[in-house]
Image: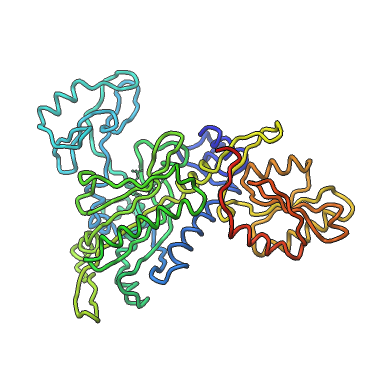
Amino acid sequence: MEKVVSLCKRRGFVYPASEIYGGLNSCWDFGPLGVELKRNVRDAWWRAMVRERDDVVGLDSAILQHPRVWEASGHVANFSDPLVDCTKCKKRFRADHIGVPYQSANGAWLHPETGAPMEESEARAMLATKKCPECEGALTPPRRFNLMFQTFLGAVVEDAARVYLRPETAQGIFTNFVNVLNSSRKKPPFGIAQIGKSFRNEITPGNFVFRTREFEQGEMEFFVPPADGEKWFDYWRKERFAWYSKFGVRPSKLRLRDHAKDELAHYSSGCSDVEYQYPFGWGELEGIANRTDFDLKQHAQHSGKDLSFFDEESKTRYVPHVIEPAAGIDRAALTFIVDAYEETTVKDEARVVLHLHPKIAPVTAAVFPLVKKEGMPEKASEIEKELRANFATVIEANASIGKRYARQDEIGTPFCITVDGQTMQDDTVTLRDRDTLIQDRVKTGELRAALDAKIRDWKRVDSVG
Ligand code: ATP
């Protein structure tokens, strides 16, 4: 993980935010290569979820929503973690992470390991035995900490003006359900997808961009007739699991974990997580949940608006059930990098390669003039300009060819094109494949087709197992 973090900084994928001021805890900026990679992740998600289907439409709702949205969704009352502070070293912990009993939103005491209700006397006795895991100092009693960031709309700082930064993008989809129904002529089964920033004041952020307080989500709410909920839940959990391996993540590092019944939110009838085996352990990459009719019913009740659907064919009215695949765009970007990272040696030379899928890699093709003379730089520039319309390209003229290959391997560029002496005679170039190291001689006029074919047929090949 440290090597990945250092590569990300050195090559311009991810920098610590506000670094010249000493950084801001767990906030990160995406640099020139990171921003391209993340854009590719977003595009791949959007293509799979919206463009390549005829039953999902897109949306981009506001980050600030009416405060009552978060009352209806349950976030004001329930979106909180129990925390304790150490009175000696001042470290902060999630109570359940360090075996400290805590109170639920409605005041009941819960066991830290099982989440089962406990008697208050029993909980207090357990609490009295707990010391800080770092310095054995005394802990404060646990208190609930709402993860939503608050701010104030307009100039007056008062309760009536309090608003929240959204902790998920999904609620903007539910509040627009009827708008989309009326304007898009879609009917269940159909979905609404959106990508955008969400904010959670996480108690324990960390593991690089895995858990941050400001992050991007790709969420889709799929509205179905109630009787079809299970069928679509199963469809989406398989579909989303397959998406990661389609873009190069090794299946051996992925698993689909179904939540046990007692892990489910009270409104949910099923939930599966796509998990990845990170260097720090298995972690959730995406959650797929059957949210039933909970959200639409809550919003109907709180807003007084009818959020049901009338099916003209069967002449029935119902509140659709909702299947939600919710992915993290930054987490997916991190996963693609971590999974692609390989250290190997070729002919005694140490080599770091990112085996990124060509559709995820920040640069698709790098063009090199072999030497800076004999018309090669001009020819390389001509080729690069030609390819720019369809691919992410760069030109690199400095250092030896070997060094240039190494630099491109390290950032995951799948293809390198070299203009050499022969090019000036017969208009062919070498096209080198990052993974197989095979070099083909290709006519410049056929480069576009050659790249298209290679991208289409790409399969992950690692130098070592
Ligand atoms: P976790 O258990 O990791 O806190 P969650 O179950 O609360 O996640 P969801 O509410 O299901 O997460 O959010 C859907 C997805 O959004 C997650 O699978 C993850 O990819 C992403 N995500 C959630 N919280 C964060 C965060 N703090 N930083 C980065 N990505 C996040």
Residue at image location 26% in from the left, 57% down from the top: 291
Percent of width and height locating residue 105: 19, 43
**Side of 29 relative to 427 (left or right):** left
Query: In the picture shown, does residue 15 fall above or below 119?
Result: below
Percent of width and height locating residue 387: 70, 62
Percent of width and height locating residue 239: 39, 58
Residue 83, located in which quarter of the rendered image? top left
Residue 36 appears in the figure: no
**Side of 163 relative to 443 (left or right):** left
Query: In the picture shown, does residue 180 fall above or below 284?
Result: below
Query: In the picture shown, does residue 163 fall above or below 408?
Result: below
Residue 26, located in which quarter of the rendered image? top left
Residue at image location 31% in from the left, 22% down from the top: 133
Residue at image location 73% in from the left, 61% down from the top: 385
Tell me the quarter of the image containing the C terminus: top right
Residue 125 appears in the figure: yes
Percent of width and height locating residue 139: 26, 24
Its colouring scheme is rainbow
* Residue in front for this viewpoint, 311 or 88: 311
Residue at image location 61% in from the left, 40% down from the top: 463
* Residue in front for this viewpoint, 363 or 171: 363
Q: How many marks?
A: 0
Query: In the picture shown, does residue 459 fall above or below 340?
Result: below
